[in-house]
Amino acid sequence: FNEGKVFKIATVDEWLDCGTLPAWLETTGEIVAKENPTFNASKFPGSEIIPPVFIAEGVNIESSKIGPHVSIEEGTTIKNSTIKNSIIRDNAVLDNVETEGSTIGAHTSLKNVKGKVDVGDHSNLEIE
C-alpha cells in the first residue's frame, strides 16, 4: 500500500461548518473578520464599504452600501444596493437590491429585490 506517499497531520484550532446555508454565511463572516482583507475604497466612489468585507479583483460597485460581513467574488457588479452579511458569487449582477443574510449564486442577476434571498447559479430575479 505504501507507494511513497507521505501523510501529514495538522492541528485544527477551530472547526467551521459550511454544511447549511446559515452555517456557510456564519463561517464566511467569521473568516472575513479574521482575515480582515484590505481593499481600496477609492475604487468604489459614491459607495460606502463597511469592514469586514472581502471584495475580489474585478468587482464593480456603484452608489451602494456594502458590509459588514460580505464576500463578493470576481466579476460581480453591484449598483444602487445595500448588502449586509451575504455571499455573492462570481459574475453576479445586482441592481437596486437591499438584502441581508443572503447567498447569491454565480452568474445571477437580481433587480429591485428587497429582503433575504438564496438563489443558485445562473438565476434571474426581477421584481417590477
Image: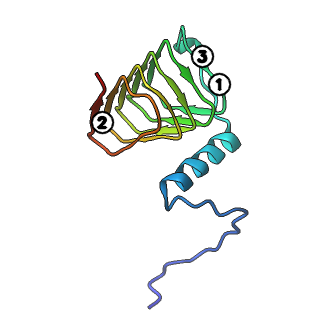
Q: Residue at x 47, y 20 (%)?
A: 81
Q: CA distance from mark 3 to mark 2?
A: 24 Å
Q: Residue at x 47, y 88 (%)?
A: 2
Residue 81 higher or lower than 120, as above or below: above
Question: Looking at the rendering, which quadrant does residue 90 occupy?
Answer: top left
Contact (Cβ within 8 Å) of mark 1 with mark 3: yes
Q: Give coordinates of residue 117: x percent, y percent.
A: 42, 40
Left or right: where 118 falls relative to 70: left
The mark that comes first in sequence, 1 or 2, is 1
Q: Nearer the viewer, residue 50 or 59?
A: 50
Callout 2 amino acid = His
**Can you name the residue that lies furthest to the right here?**
13
Q: CA distance from mark 1 to mark 2?
A: 24 Å
Name the disc covering residue 107, or none.
Answer: 2
Secondary structure at numbered mark 3: strand
Secondary structure at numbered mark 2: loop
Left or right: where 17 falls relative to 12: left
**What residue sits right under mark 3 in the picture?**
48
**How is the protein colored in the picture?**
rainbow
**What residue sits right under mark 1 in the picture?**
50
Secondary structure at numbered mark 1: loop
Residue 99 higher or lower than 121, as above or below: above
Query: Is disc 3 surrounded by few (<14), some (14 to 19) or many (20+) residues within 10 Å?
Result: some
Callout 1 amino acid = Ile
Disc count in the image? 3
Callout 3 amino acid = Glu
Q: CA distance from mark 1 to mark 3?
A: 6 Å
Q: Give coordinates of residue 51: x percent, y percent.
A: 66, 29
Q: Nearer the viewer, residue 111 or 42?
A: 111
Query: Is disc 1 surrounded by few (<14), some (14 to 19) or many (20+) residues within 10 Å?
Result: some
